[in-house]
């Protein structure tokens, strides 16, 4: 596996490589089809403007997030792009059998050779009841506790290297390396690099110990970002994958032509998160709905905290905020996620950020 499959290239005046995290958000008055069309447009824009990678994240039972099946969405995006890296940010490993993930991402690798990432998380990506339905068990803690063992099993399926005598030694993930050892077989030398995702210290330490790249969810766990990255770097052991730590952070960022519009969009996103936290997830509300909503004291406090963690405003303000965040955290890559009601607002945000950093135009 080449290190350059992990480490990105700095473009324009950006301090580090810039990437995209797409939650395939669905706004009120729009359909999942609309959201997926936005994802295609956004992935093509990201590719043309020099963003390094484009990830989608697994979520379940959330009307406003249409990314329950990352592998399916990535296959669709692979058909509409040519160069940009595509991946999961992430697939929630305890929700799936490792063999299934190895097969899905082996298939994606065959579709888009040399440009697929496999980001893995240990959280369910949903509420407990939905996680129980996904896993067909109510003993959810076991999935999280077994994460290192599940990861090791998945890695062996991807590499097709279970030792002789192992119960799975004669089981092969296809497409995969076994095809190269079959008579007349020729197989791509690539396999998707594994990333570990996290919002606390567990995955940070595990990624460091295994010498894997690490992605931290700053966009919803900002208070833990610096401690987790410090732990990752302190725990890091060189591996065949990386000779030095490489960490990206997910950042909520929204640029608009008008600063007031950025505040309106972020306020609507905050209302959406309030409803999710209250167990009433729905479609992303319009800014007009958020303006008409009477925020209670606790809601107002949450909205203020949420808004403070979103880098938003004019392109120059967003560029300045991203620069400051990168300096403070030392992140090797910034993965930007925009949460807004309309797809056109999200696409425009990435255009403005690309322009602010002088990213390529073709």
Image: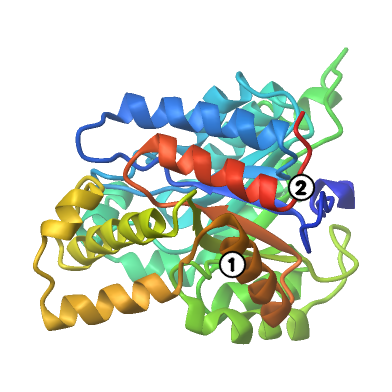
Residue 63, above or below 173: below
- The local crowd at label 2, few if under 14, some if 14 to 19, many if 20 or more residues have their Cα within 10 Å, is some
Look at the image and tell me in which quarter the C terminus lies: top right
Residue located at (31% from left, 45% from top): 341
**Residue, disc 1:** 148
Quarter of image, res 127? bottom left
Instruction: Name the spot of residue 262 as percent of width and height, x first.
Output: 41, 57
Instruction: Name the spot of residue 37 as percent of width and height, x first.
Output: 43, 25
Is residue 169 rendered to the left or right of residue 188?
A: left
Instruction: Name the spot of residue 87 as percent of width and height, x first.
Output: 61, 42
Instruction: Name the spot of residue 117 as percent of width and height, x first.
Output: 67, 44
Q: Nearer the viewer, mark 2 or mark 1?
A: 2
Q: Which mark is residue 358?
A: 2
Q: Nearer the viewer, residue 317 or 186?
A: 317
Is residue 257 rendered to the left or right of residue 323?
A: left
Q: CA distance from mark 2 to mark 1?
A: 41 Å
Residue located at (32% from left, 51% from top): 135
Residue located at (53% from left, 70% from top): 218
Element class at badge 1: helix
First along the sequence among labels 2 and 1: 1
- The local crowd at label 1, few if under 14, some if 14 to 19, many if 20 or more residues have their Cα within 10 Å, is some
Q: Which mark is residue 202?
A: none
Let me know if residue 67 appears in the view.
Answer: yes
Element class at badge 2: loop
Q: How many marks?
A: 2
Q: Nearer the viewer, residue 290 or 71?
A: 290
Residue located at (37% from left, 49% from top): 340
């Amino acid at each position: 596996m080449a290190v350059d499959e992990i480490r990105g290239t700095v473009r324009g005046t950006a301090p580090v490589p810039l990437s995209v995290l797409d939650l395939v958000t669905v706004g009120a008055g729009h359909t999942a089809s609309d959201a997926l069309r936005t994802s295609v447009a956004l992935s093509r824009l990201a590719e043309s403007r020099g963003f390094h990678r484009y990830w989608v994240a697994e979520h379940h039972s959330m009307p406003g997030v249409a990314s329950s099946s990352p592998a399916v969405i990535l296959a669709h995006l692979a058909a509409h792009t040519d160069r940009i890296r595509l991946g999961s940010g992430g697939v929630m490993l305890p929700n799936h059998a490792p063999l299934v993930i190895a097969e899905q991402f082996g298939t994606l690798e065959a579709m888009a050779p040399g440009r697929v990432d496999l980001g893995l998380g240990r959280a369910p990506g949903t509420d407990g009841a939905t996680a129980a339905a996904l896993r067909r068990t109510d003993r959810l803690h076991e999935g999280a506790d077994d994460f290192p063992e599940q990861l090791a099993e998945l890695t062996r399926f991807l590499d097709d290297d279970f030792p002789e005598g192992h119960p799975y030694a004669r089981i092969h993930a296809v497409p995969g390396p076994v095809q190269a050892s079959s008579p007349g077989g020729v197989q791509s030398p690539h396999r998707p690099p594994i990333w570990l995702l996290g919002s606390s210290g567990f995955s940070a330490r595990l990624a460091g110990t295994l010498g894997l790249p690490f992605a931290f969810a700053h966009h919803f766990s900002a208070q833990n970002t610096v401690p987790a990255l410090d732990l990752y770097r302190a725990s890091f052991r060189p591996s065949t994958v990386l000779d030095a730590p490489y960490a990206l952070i997910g950042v909520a960022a929204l640029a608009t032509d008008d600063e007031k519009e950025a505040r309106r969009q972020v306020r609507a996103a905050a209302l959406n998160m309030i409803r999710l936290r209250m167990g009433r997830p729905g479609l992303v509300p319009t800014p007009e709905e958020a303006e008409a909503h009477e925020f209670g004291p606790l809601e107002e406090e949450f909205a203020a905290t949420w808004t403070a963690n979103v880098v938003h405003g004019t392109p120059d303000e967003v560029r300045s905020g991203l620069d400051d965040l990168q300096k403070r955290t030392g992140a090797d890559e910034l993965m930007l996620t925009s949460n807004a009601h309309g797809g056109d607002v999200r696409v425009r945000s990435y255009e403005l950020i690309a322009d602010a950093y002088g990213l390529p135009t073709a």
